[in-house]
Amino acid sequence: MSTPSGRVPASATPAPTAAHDTSSGSPQSLREAWPALAGLSAVFLFEMLDNSILNVALPTIGRELHASTVALQWVTGAYAVVFGGLMLVFGAVADRFGRRRVMLVGLTLLGAASLATACVTTAEQLIAVRAVTGAAAAMTTPGSMALAFRLFDDDGLRVRATTLISTVGLVGLALGPTAGGFVLAIAPWQVLLLVNVPIAALAIAGVRAGIAADQAADLHRDPVDVSGAVLATGTIVAVLAAPTLFLDQGAGSWLPWAITALAVAGAVLFVLRERTARHPLLDLRLVAHPLVAGGLAYKAAAGLATAGLGYLVTLQLQLDWGWSPGRAALGLLPQVVVLVAGGAFVGPFVRRAGLDRAAWLSAAAVVCGLAVYASLGRFGYVWVALALVLVAAGMRVVGVVAGVNVLRGLPQNRTTIGAALTDTATEVASGAGLAVTGTVLAGLFTGDIAAAHWSARQTARFHEAVTVSGLALTAVAAALVGWAVRHTRGAADDGSDTPDTDAVGTGTPGVDTPGSDTPGAGTPGTGTGTDAPGSGTSDADAPGGSPAKPAPSATI
């Protein structure tokens, strides 16, 4: 029998998937949700603006705080490591204790940490403040995606909302360095971090006004898997620290390899723990759902490609071609323009292609851009610009669509950890991309790479390193995209488009009955107006195989 439109207590029936939020009263347009979207946009603006604007001030910080090169590296590294390491944990906490509640606590912590910047007098104090800021970001960033997704029932509005939020953040990323330079000309560097205080205040006001209080029926009460949380955090921290160690100490040092081995061991232990835990931090059966696994693969492919490309292009423009930092910034302008202006084209493209087809097409564009750069980038700037445009255009779409697809494949009470999972996949893949490019470059390039003038042999070796590392990353990213396409298409063919309902965690201890894999007998819906794999909403999406009503048409 069909599920009624009202909410059903979690103890009575398995939690519905996120693609079928049956709650009534959701906004029917972005305008109706503007307070919430303003607050969530401010959250993402902080994430994108924070590090980009801080990088401009690093030389000034180094002089005023008498900081060493290593200390300056940890000013940015402490934030990244803590942020990446804690996202999964806080995602799980938010799904248990309240997404809005955790978001507001994180924003309050963000404001307090930013205010503490005014009292910083040593590099060590600044590193501690940046670590606290990373923890605050881990509490807020995944929640911005999850709350935006849960605001709407319609996938089209979800895409538009996510596009709006990401556009605000990308504008901050693009304008941050320039604005930071102007601020440093007239004010102390602390002002660049104090700007987070009004951003946090705006976000708090928007979330309090536009996001309804957490409801117990939307959460689950499984105990927190402390062992899994420790293993996940330790593994991700090791993964994120390894690339920096490879770049700093080279592949000949034992420490980067030891940290890498620790990351691999931690990952194996985490998987074993999650497969045997009664209440796992991250239920791997949910991750295996086609929409979830495919979306994560797309995000990982894009993160791998963009990190490698950004690192190599920066070195090529300034060190190989001898461009000044200002000219190199202008050289990256095509990417900035596409990232900022491309938001207007995301909706029409997704409406025409459908969510799932848009995901693999955009991910393929990122891979093609990396391949163009690896093969042809040394022959002139026009090829570099083409690669930057392809990667930026693909990232503009895949960043939105793959994230939405992941949340579509998860139960309602797992959306925040799902958003954290997509961010973590991007962070880890970016770290892997940097590790590959840095290791290949260290192995092939001889001498001081920062020297003012390279010999002909050094230039040739650099080009060889760019080609080898670029094509290696292209091959891995292409394999991830190909796997995701086959995985989602196979799921569409056999009708298995829903996670096992025993994996959703109904909040009733001791329930561990295998979920039904039998699809319902209803008629598939056409939520996105396309026959792309997974784009329709079949009744197999309903918990327990019961027929589900078709999803509303996506108007983007």
Image (tube, rainbow, N blue to C red):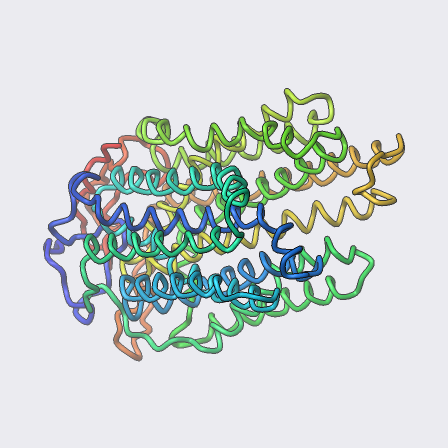
Q: Is residue 376 left or right of residue 117?
A: right
- In the image, 160 versus 285, the foreground residue is 160
Residue at 59 percent of width and 40 percent of height = 305
Residue 336: % across, % down: 50, 32
Q: How many marks?
A: 0
Q: Is residue 238 above or below residue 360?
A: below
- In the image, 340 versus 232, the foreground residue is 340
Is residue 271 in view from this perspective? no
Q: Is residue 377 above or below residue 225?
A: above
Residue 102: quarter of image: bottom left
Residue at 86 percent of width and 36 percent of height = 458
- In the image, 252 versus 335, the foreground residue is 335
- Residue at the extreme front of the image, as rendered: 186
Q: Is residue 56 above or below residue 394?
A: below
Residue 392: % across, % down: 51, 32
Q: Is residue 157 left or right of residue 477?
A: left
Residue 176: % across, % down: 48, 41
Q: Is residue 332 left or right of residue 286?
A: right
Residue at 63 percent of width and 47 percent of height = 433
Residue 526: % across, % down: 24, 35
Is residue 58 in view from this perspective? yes
Instruction: Locate the N terminus by quadrant.
Output: bottom left
Residue 99: quarter of image: bottom left
- In the image, 237 versus 327, the foreground residue is 327
Instruction: Locate the C terminus by quadrant.
Output: top left
